[in-house]
Amino acid sequence: MTTTAPSPVALTSRFATELPELALAWQAEEAPDPQLLALNRPLAGELGLDADWLQSAEGVRFLVGNAVPDGAHPVAQCYAGHQFGGYAPRLGDGRALLLGEIDALGGRDLHLKGSGRTPFARGGDGLAVVGPMLREYVVSEAMHALGIPTTRSLAVVATGRRVQRETALPGAVLARIASSHLRVGSFQYAAATGDVDLLDRLTRHAIARHYPEAAQAPNPALALYEAVVAAQASLVAKWMLVGFVHGVMNTDNVTISGETIDYGPCAFLDAFDPATTFSSIDQGGRYSYGNQPVVLEWDLARLGEALLPLVHDDQEEAVSQVTEALGAFRREYSAAWSVGLRAKLGLAGSRDGAEPVVEDLLGLLQRDHPDFTSFFRALADAADGDAAPARDLVLDRDGFDRWLARWQSLEPDSGLMRRTNPVVIPRNHLVEEALSAATAGDLDPFGRLLDAVSRPFEARPGFGRYAEPAPESFGAYTTYCGT
């Protein structure tokens, strides 16, 4: 039974108050036997939360939405979205709740995932299971450690309920932290209602939360759009530079804040191949690794369409202004990718002759498909004179040797490379190992993996296996959304 009670956690309900048309008051389903599996104590501290209390029986009930603080008003958020290119006019939080906002760090959402059916569930059970929730926890924390904007994971709680998927699995709830859960789909929904006042209030809400300088612009809606385009161009470049494949880049999974959200069928590259797709439902490769910038530009075009009524009263002029703003995406992505790739190669700044060397390396990678993470980290050793580890990862040794001589003539900075290229990412085989063990009740592999990915740029004694590619016996990897 959900209860309200005095609590050490103070939550506000700004989203629900300012945008009631996008907020459906709802309560989490009762968890029969909630047990804490993982708690992010450092994040709790940053948020001003009492980690010891969160580990208490009442704190755990709070983390599954069954003990709601006085004054909090949990809601399921309403939004639309293009899913694999097809428009769905009414999606919303089918298995999630926004408990409210925490004032710390400039304001953060506290959001539950797997807390039960809502009216947006569309026939689903509204529940989640241990494996996918721990996947989101470990991968989002790895992304944070890599310096990539992301939602964060505060806790995963087992509910004590069995959830039917292919088999009956232990249920769980993820408590997620985000700058907000506003997304492209939020604007699509507001625009589709035809209520320009709602769209305007949503735009002003987003500006106040994420881009306050846009409020002073001559055209605030256009300034918001330009800011989101820039933030998302930077974000997807960061994904590409570490080999991250999101897997489900629907418009309802593209945030206005520029944070990565929803780690369902995500994974990281092992062998470099732009055509890599992991998700079981991405049969056509729409969200493949190499296609991610193109898809994100498409998603941002949908945001621009939603904002047209606010950009200009004349639709033709509005389209012209939005098209021009979207045109910045490719330039900004290309610049971010180029700067990042140069840093990975130890070539910060502008150096004569660097561009052909960078381009030729991409050709070598596409031909030979070396392990992406291992190759770039090994190049740091090559910058110090030991080329063997990197050379052993490619098939075209002669081609690599020719490229290496040209690259070394540019005097790459091995220190920059080691600060830029991780030793450790959430290797897919290790993620599966940890999640399988956790589903069976053993959390030790998960804890060890979390420790490893939390310090990704350090080569630590005892963590060698976390830096190694998957064994050949692991085979082709397929991910699932968890619903």
Image (tube, rainbow, N blue to C red):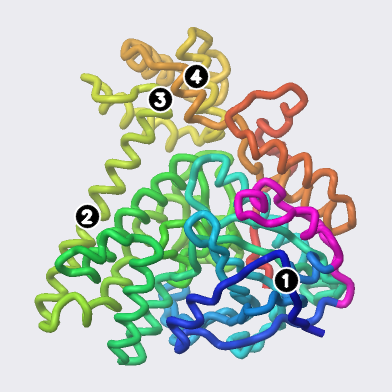
Q: Secondary structure at mark 1?
A: loop
Q: Going by the image, does 447 lie left or right of 136?
A: right
Circle nearer the N terminus (3, 2): 2
User: In 3D space, how far apart are the residues under numbered discs 2 and 4 (Cα atoms)?
Assistant: 33 Å
Residue closer to the observer: 432 or 453: 453
Residue closer to the observer: 404 or 130: 130
Give residue 161's mark.
Answer: none
Q: Please say if the residues under marks 3 and 2 sit with CB atoms less than 8 Å apart.
A: no
User: In 3D space, how far apart are the residues under numbered discs 4 and 1 (Cα atoms)?
Assistant: 41 Å
Q: Amino acid at mark 1?
A: Ala
Residue occupying image coordinates x 46% and y 47% = 239
- What residue is pinned by disc 3? 345
Which one is closest to the eye, mark 3 or mark 2? 2
Which one is closest to the eye, mark 4 or mark 1? 1
Q: Amino acid at mark 2?
A: Ala
Q: Going by the image, does 154 lie left or right of 417?
A: right
Residue closer to the observer: 148 or 207: 207
Circle nearer the N terminus (3, 4): 3
Q: Going by the image, does 339 lie left or right of 396?
A: left
Q: Residues within 10 Å of mark 4 (few under 14, many from 20)?
A: many
Give residue 128's mark.
Answer: 1
User: In 3D space, how far apart are the residues under numbered discs 1 and 2 (Cα atoms)?
Assistant: 38 Å
Give residue 380's mark.
Answer: 4
Q: Please say if the residues under marks 1 and 3 sit with CB atoms less than 8 Å apart.
A: no
User: In 3D space, how far apart are the residues under numbered discs 3 and 4 (Cα atoms)?
Assistant: 8 Å
- What residue is pinned by disc 2? 328
Residue closer to the observer: 2 or 398: 2
Q: Which residues are magenta?
A: 32-57
Circle nearer the N terminus (4, 1): 1
* Residue 38 pos. (x, y %): 77, 54
Q: Amino acid at mark 3?
A: Leu
* Residue 396 pos. (x, y %): 47, 23
